[in-house]
């Protein structure tokens, strides 16, 4: 089954304790992206990657890191989480073809609480 | 710059009555437009997409949307609401022919369906 998976689905942590949220897709997509969803703000892009070893900042990258060592995986790293990073996080992937729209496939989400 | 405005943060309808969720966009280029739905505690699912092939787009679960360039609108409709339609709906614009494939999300419209 074609899908995007995220782990963990729920996480409660404390300020300053490094954490990683994993994201994996099995569709051989070049493009992957992380979003955070906050009430009243919709989804905002954190980081994206257009291929292996190619990453760039989205709209709200502060406090986050990513890496893209393999095509299928795109982990999100919070080196020193703070309470304002409490949010619902989504990973997404899509093909990267310049001549067509780019429908993105979303993971199920990771609800993070930073105390 | 692209932007998306969902004109209603909350819409409430009775079961069996029509649904109208409004979306206006701005884009300097010919956009691709999407509607995504998010059921409680679930990820985002694509409802339908406009990619310039036809202005009236039919999606899943009886939803459809009409692209009106003169009005820069992409409103989502359904003739008869069902209880299972209660969810959050996001209008999304994507710049076509873009290597980044950025998705710009509206802030969402919460649809309530009353029995």
Image (cartoon, rainbow, N blue to C red):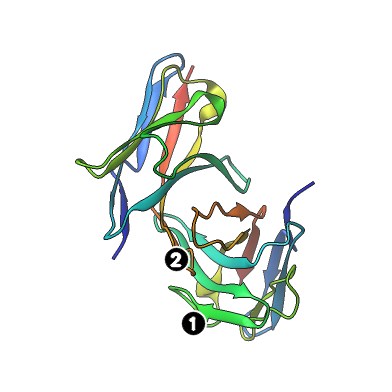
Q: In the figure, residue B78 lies in which quadrant?
A: top left
Mark 2 packing: few (<14 Cα in 10 Å), some, or many (20+)? some
Q: Is residue A3 above or below residue A114?
A: above
Residue B69: x and y in percent read: 25, 42
Residue B59: x and y in percent read: 51, 31
Q: Are marks 1 and 2 in contact (CB under 8 Å)?
A: no
The C terminus of chain A, quarter of image:
bottom right
Mark 1 packing: few (<14 Cα in 10 Å), some, or many (20+)? few
Mark 1–mark 2 Cα distance, whole angstroms, equals: 24 Å
Q: Chain of mark 2?
A: B
Q: Is residue B43 above or below residue A57?
A: above
Q: Nearer the viewer, residue A90 or A54?
A: A54
Circle 2: element type: loop
Q: Residue at x 55, y 30 (%)?
A: B60
The residue carrying mark 2 is B98
Circle 1: element type: loop
Residue A29: x and y in percent read: 67, 62
Circle on res. A62? 1
Looking at this rendering, what residue extends furthest in the top direction?
B16
Q: Nearer the viewer, mark 1 or mark 2?
A: 2
Residue B46: x and y in percent read: 55, 42
Q: Residue at x 61, y 59 (%)?
A: A95
């Amino acid at each position: 089954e074609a899908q995007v998976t995220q782990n963990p689905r729920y996480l409660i942590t404390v300020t300053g304790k490094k954490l990683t949220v994993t994201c994996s897709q099995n569709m051989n997509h070049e493009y992957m992206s992380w979003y955070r969803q906050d009430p009243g703000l919709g989804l905002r892009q954190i980081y994206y990657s257009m291929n292996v070893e190619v990453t760039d900042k989205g709209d709200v990258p502060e406090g986050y890191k990513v890496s893209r060592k393999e095509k299928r995986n795109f982990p999100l790293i919070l080196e020193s989480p703070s309470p304002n990073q409490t949010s619902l996080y989504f990973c997404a992937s899509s093909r990267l073809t310049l001549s067509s729209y780019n429908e993105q496939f979303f993971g199920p989400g990771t609800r993070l609480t930073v105390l | 710059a692209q932007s998306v405005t969902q004109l209603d943060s909350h819409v409430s309808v009775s079961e069996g009555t029509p649904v109208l969720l409004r979306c206006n966009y701005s884009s300097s280029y010919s956009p691709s437009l999407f509607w995504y739905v998010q059921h409680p505690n679930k990820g985002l699912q694509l409802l339908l997409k406009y990619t310039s092939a036809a202005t009236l787009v039919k999606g899943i679960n009886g939803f459809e949307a009409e692209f009106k360039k003169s009005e820069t609108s992409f409103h989502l409709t359904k003739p008869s609401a069902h209880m299972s339609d209660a969810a959050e709906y996001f209008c999304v614009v994507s710049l076509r022919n873009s290597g980044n494939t950025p998705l710009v999300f509206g802030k969402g419209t919460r649809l309530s369906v009353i029995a």
